[in-house]
Amino acid sequence: MKKFVMAALGGTLAGAIATTQVAGPLLAQEGAANATVYEQLDLFGDIFERIRNQYVEDVEPGELIEAAIDGMLTSLDPHSSYLSPDDAAQMQVQTRGEFGGLGIEVTQEEGFIKVVSPIDSTPAAEAGIEAGDFITHVDGESMLGLTLDEAVDRMRGPVGSEIIVTVVREGENEPFDVSIIRDTIELQAVRSRTQGDTVVLRVTTFNDKTTPNLVSKLEEEVETLGGMNSVNGFVLDLRNNPGGLLTQAIRVSDAFLEKGEIVSTRGRDPVDGDRFNATPGDLAQGKPIVVLINGGSASASEIVAGALQDHRRAIVVGTKSFGKGSVQTVMPLRGEGAMRLTTARYYTPSGRSIQALGVSPDIIVEQPRRSPTTEEEDEPASAVGPRTEGDLRGSLDNDSLTDDQVRQIEEDRAKAQAAADLREEDYQLAYAIDILKGLNALGPVEEDRRASSK
């Protein structure tokens, strides 16, 4: 028995020694790491004091610390930043759908300010600013070397004041200046229209108003067409939509999906991941959907396009989207400021991350660039226009059709002409509507084929 006790004590002692041998270096490494952090903080304090005491001009200590915090955050990625109390308040106003400014969503790329997208019917959009433009100067002052928040601050100003931005655009040989008058930006989250038998829903941003506006606009347009049976499909136009609230992207996706995953988010710790699933109910009642995207479609727009694409609920048409696949969390700080920190990546239902890659359309359709001189250079092929049989003197009348049939032919011809005019105005949208027409034309044939196979 004594031998057993001694053996047990010996084993315990050996285990303790082994544990000490393993834990010792780990504790030493942790201690060294902490010591390095403290040394770096001492270095920061030393630099801070030297700037306060020896810089050529007096500086505000609070501004120095805010700049240091912002520099720490912006060094992580283009979307993490410090929000001063004013910026934090402004951001809350933006999510409610109304704010002052130019009406552009910007990011930073290799030190330059890049336009993600102009917002519809805002001063920037009306002045001709386009997605992909680089803003190099504001009122003659270079933007190179500024943080994203500093650049945004330069572009802000009193409503009604003028700002001159210098733009570098792909395809243009030289930079050019654009004059913009600042205004209060009142975002209409969803605009709608009917194009023939198609309902077009233009979603410009994802804020608190987006889903309610989408539901009401869709119902209004369906009623205008005489009910869902008269609708051949829906176009969800997400072009130049810079994104917004994740919750709204989920709700908009859910509006057209009956079931299944919409999006998942994964942070550094797997425990922090989330999955968001659709609930029963399809606002479009199974009607075909085409989603339009382009290089200005970012973030929440990409979540919607990716979810509907993965579930094969919609055909995605246009050009590759922006590729912002990260989630930012806004964390309140002392002093009414806030920290915007990238905390997760999001993934579409099939498990793909679109970070830096974007959503690839099912059908790639470029929007032709129209030169301002095109209309002046084009000349009509004939001064008298095309001649038909009906224009010939003494031609026979068509007496085989009733007045109602003739009227129907004329209405169909007018619709075809409207579609042709739309191709000149918005080629991508016209293409999307043509897809819906094709799907509806094939629909009854497909149903007959299935019925005959039973």
Image (tube, rainbow, N blue to C red):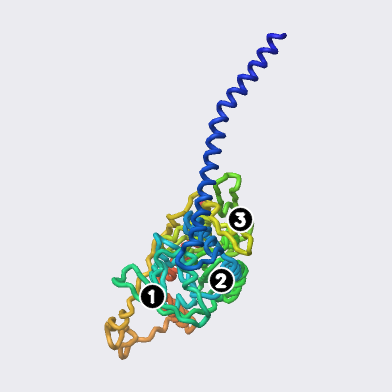
Q: Which residue is mark 1?
A: 140
N-term-proximal mark, 3 vs 2? 2
Tell me the amino acid under the disc marked 1: Gly
Residue drawn 51% across the image and 54% down it: 46
Please tell me whether mark 3 sits on a helix, a strand or a loop: loop
For image coordinates 45% across by 75% down, the residue present is 125
Q: Nearer the viewer, residue 223 or 21?
A: 21
**Residue picked out by circle 2:** 189
Work out whether mark 2 precedes mark 1 in sequence or the reverse, and give the earlier one: 1
Q: Give the farthest residue toward the front.
A: 53
Q: In the rendered structure, are the residues bearing label 3 and label 1 in contact, judged by CB atoms less than 8 Å apart?
A: no
Frontmost of labels 3 and 2 is 2
Instruction: Tell me if mark 2 has few (under 14), some (14-19) or many (20+) residues whose alpha carbon lies within 10 angstroms of its own.
Output: many
Which mark, by number, is residue 278? 3
Residue 50's label in the rendered image is none
Q: Mark 3 to mark 1: distance in Å?
A: 50 Å
Q: Amino acid at mark 2?
A: Ala
